[in-house]
């Protein structure tokens, strides 16, 4: 039976059962950190959140594309300028490939500046014969495989806030001060692209952009200042509700509450229960909200969930992120599209081809195959095309570093090469080259459907 409160507040979720959040052993320290986090300045603004929502409303009408991508789980220790620059650079490159190929606006939402918590399939693991907490992301506990480091630590809520603030500040500086200046697109090229079969097509794209900018400069009395700047939005899974609710507040001259820790948050596949804490929290905030949908799920519960979170049927509010896996998507996706369309829900459809295609390699690495990822993308576009629906987004886990975590791609990385540079703290990510290659292929599938 639901214990639903009569009215919503940023803390009403605390009256509900909650999944994927271990108990903190020091409840007094938790409350102290929570209250301190409530007093700190917001990381993002309500104007930015509303701007993203307006853009997503355009996507839901087939007038743009949402590119959501970034780290599986960010690490406090890796909040470094080089890591941030590389991730921003590959997000820029992939999005501009899509813009050039699709000819529609592409809105960038990074899994960054807050993606510090991860759901896990089990609460504990056994290390050297001792049962310890599973690692749930730096926002909750430490990665080191000792009992002491794995204890949930509320001070990490504050550290997460500060690391997110540093990351956001640097991202904004890069976006505002010429890092993405279209007058110098050749600066985006990564050296290894010279060995990629799409290198010539990429070079042609760079030249095309350069020529277009020169033309605009020639016909305009003022330099095209807008071409120097790009918008970046941030997102994370709203998993640790102490972190998210502490930064949820009212703002002047606007109705409702905003989660000011990120522009967009999403509801995970393991926290979708209608009568539990995460749904209760998310139903009360104004931010755009992603909903991960994959096995196990029911269509009826999914429809009730969308209605619960977006009862006003606000356009740009809900992003449905499907994650079925290449072997199940053809069976599962068509009926979901039909049911949501029948209800008239104005959702953005997004494909997450990563999480349903994870497996263990023969040498015991958690990995994903590039071809399997692309297979799910192709199926998703084909199904939406057949259903007369618009697939307006992809959701990827990638990094700006040259890691070896996913097999396949034009370089032909196989399982024996995974140990060369396997860095992830949780799930395997696409590397630089795989991300750029996938961007080309995704663009081609989009053009086949909507070009």
Image: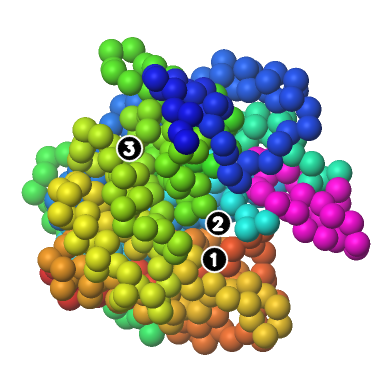
144 falls in the magenta region: yes
Q: Residue at 25% of width from left, 66% of height from top?
A: 335
Q: Nearer the viewer, residue 241 or 67?
A: 241
* Mark 1: secondary structure: loop
Q: Check disc 2 and report the residue beneath it.
A: 72
Quarter where residue 379 is shown? bottom left
Q: Is residue 359 above or below residue 340?
A: below
C-alpha gap between disc 2 and disc 1: 7 Å
The answer to whether residue 254 is seen in the rendering is: yes
- Stretch in magenta: 123-147
The crowd level at tag 3 (other Cα within 10 Å; few <14, some 14-19, many 20+) is some
Q: Position of residue 241 (x, y in %)?
A: 55, 34
User: Which of the pair 33/9 is nearer the observer?
Assistant: 9
Q: Secondary structure at mark 3?
A: helix
**Which residue is denoted by mark 1 in the rendering?**
429
* Residue 126: percent from left, percent from top: 82, 60
- In the depicted view, which residue is nearer to us: 439 or 21? 21
Badge nearest the viewer, 2 or 3: 3
CB of mark 2 within 8 Å of CB of mark 1?
yes
Question: Upstream in the sequence, badge 2 or badge 3?
Answer: 2
Examine the image and state in which quarter residue 311 appears: top left
In the image, residue 58 sits, relative to residue 160, either above or below, namely below
Measured from the top left, where is residue 349 in percent x and y? 27, 57
Residue 276 vs residue 120: left or right? left
Q: Is 128 situated left or right of 328 in this image?
A: right
């Amino acid at each position: 039976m639901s214990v639903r409160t009569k009215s919503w507040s940023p803390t009403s979720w605390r009256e509900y059962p909650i999944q994927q959040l271990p108990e903190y052993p020091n409840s007094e320290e938790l409350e102290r950190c929570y209250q301190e986090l409530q007093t700190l300045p917001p990381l993002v603004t309500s104007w930015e959140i509303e701007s993203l929502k307006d853009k997503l409303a355009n996507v839901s009408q087939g007038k743009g594309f949402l590119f959501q991508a970034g780290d599986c789980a960010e690490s406090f220790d890796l909040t470094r300028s080089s890591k941030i620059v590389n991730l921003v650079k590959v997000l820029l490159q992939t999005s501009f490939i899509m813009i050039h190929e699709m000819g529609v606006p592409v809105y960038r939402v990074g899994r960054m500046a807050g993606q510090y918590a991860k759901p896990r399939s089990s609460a504990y693991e056994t290390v050297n014969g001792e049962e310890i907490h599973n690692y749930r992301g730096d926002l909750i506990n430490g990665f080191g495989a000792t009992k002491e480091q794995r204890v949930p630590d509320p001070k990490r809520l504050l550290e997460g806030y500060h690391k997110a603030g540093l990351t956001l500040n640097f991202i904004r500086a890069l976006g505002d001060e010429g890092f993405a200046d279209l007058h110098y697109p050749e600066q985006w090229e990564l050296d290894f692209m010279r060995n990629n079969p799409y290198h010539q097509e990429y070079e042609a794209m760079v030249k095309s952009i350069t020529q277009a900018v020169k033309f605009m400069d020639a016909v305009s009395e003022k330099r095209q200042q807008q071409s120097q700047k790009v918008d970046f939005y941030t997102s994370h899974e709203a998993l640790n509700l102490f972190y998210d609710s502490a930064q949820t507040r009212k703002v002047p001259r606007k109705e409702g509450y905003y989660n000011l820790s990120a522009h967009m948050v999403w509801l995970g596949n393991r926290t979708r229960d209608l009568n539990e804490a995460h749904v209760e929290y998310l139903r009360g905030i104004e931010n755009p909200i992603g909903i991960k949908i994959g096995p196990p799920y029911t269509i009826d519960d999914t429809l009730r969930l969308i209605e619960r979170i977006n009862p006003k049927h606000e356009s740009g509010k809900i992003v449905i992120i499907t994650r079925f896996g290449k072997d199940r998507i053809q069976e599962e996706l068509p009926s979901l599209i039909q049911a949501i369309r029948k209800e008239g829900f104005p959702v953005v459809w997004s494909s997450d081809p990563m999480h349903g295609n994870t497996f263990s390699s023969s040498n015991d690495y958690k990995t994903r195959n590039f071809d399997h990822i692309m297979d799910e993308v192709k199926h998703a576009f084909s199904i939406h095309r057949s259903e007369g629906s618009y697939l307006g987004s992809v959701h990827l886990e990638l990094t700006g570093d040259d890691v070896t975590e996913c097999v396949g791609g034009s370089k032909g990385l196989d399982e024996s090469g995974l140990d060369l540079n396997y860095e992830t703290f949780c799930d395997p990510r696409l590397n630089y080259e795989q991300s750029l290659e996938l961007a080309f292929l995704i663009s081609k599938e989009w053009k086949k459907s909507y070009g």
